[in-house]
Image (cartoon, rainbow, N blue to C red):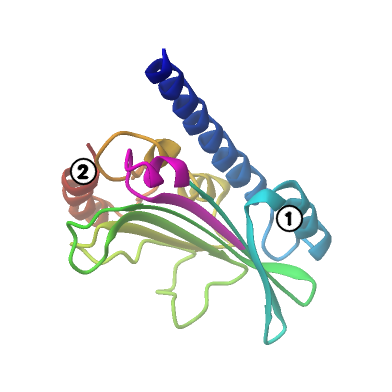
Amino acid sequence: MVAGAGVLTLSCYAFFIRVQAESLLKDLTTITVGSSTESDVEQLTRKHSWYLVSREYNDGVAITTFKVDNRWLSALRIEPVALFGAAVYVKNGRASHIGAWLMRSMDIFPTFGASAGMVDEYTELPKYLSRGAHYEFPTPIGEPYLRVRLDSHASAVQRGHAFAFSFSCLIKPGGGCDFSLAGLENRPARDRLVGFVQSALSK
């Protein structure tokens, strides 16, 4: 009976954190870079205040950061540490950059101790980051993560692909994170990444 109650409690907790991460992502993506205001970010902050990590001001930019993690599951050593994080940057009263990342500890990679997916959306891609496109995948081949960068000129479909996180990564037993590659429109880059990501991250 006690063991059954414990399993039920942890299952409910796992369901809860997945729902909270999905809710945070859904509300984050209502923020539109270049047009959403400080008031819009404040509404996001009030709704998800339980997961607020910090509010910082640096060189005229207000940065609000959130995190949903699996602390109970990892503390009990049922699962590795995993988290979903999000950040909104506001400059001159408008959202200028939003970011989201999903990470799961995996010590098998010597140069990057996690399986991870990261997205950064800007009003305009900074010149030092951009290769001339509005939707890019700058992930080096052989790395255990998938990074996406885009700006306000990317299409709605591209944006949807970029933020298509699967939150089973927070709670699933074993393995790394499974990342959708549906948005990789550059076929050679997609072909190079598919084999590595599927073998190293997907279980």
Is residue 77 found left or right of 199 in the rendered image? right
Q: Position of residue 129 (x, y in %)?
A: 44, 77
Q: In the rendered view, tell whether residue 3 sits above or below residue 91.
A: above
According to the picture, the residue beneath numbered tag 1 turns out to be: 45
Q: What's the residue type where badge 2 is placed?
A: Gln
Task: Examine the structure image and report whether residue 73 is included in the region drawn in magenta.
Answer: yes
Name the residue at 80% across, 72% down: 93
Distance of label 1 from label 2 (alpha carbons): 35 Å
Name the residue at 22% across, 57% down: 107
Quick one: SS at disc 2? helix
Which residues make up the magenta segment? 71-87
Is residue 154 found left or right of 179 in the rendered image? right
Q: In the rendered view, tell whether residue 174 sits above or below residue 133.
A: above
Q: In which quarter of the image is the C terminus?
A: top left
Q: Where is residue 82 in the image (x, y as percent from the top left)?
A: 40, 49
According to the picture, the residue beneath numbered tag 2 turns out to be: 198
Task: Examine the structure image and report whether residue 174 is included in the region drawn in magenta.
Answer: no
Quick one: SS at disc 1? helix
Camera-nearest label, 1 or 2: 1
Farthest bottom residue in view: 59
Whether residue 70 is visible to the viewer of this picture, yes or no, is no
Is residue 35 found left or right of 5 in the rendered image? right
Which dot marks residue 4?
none
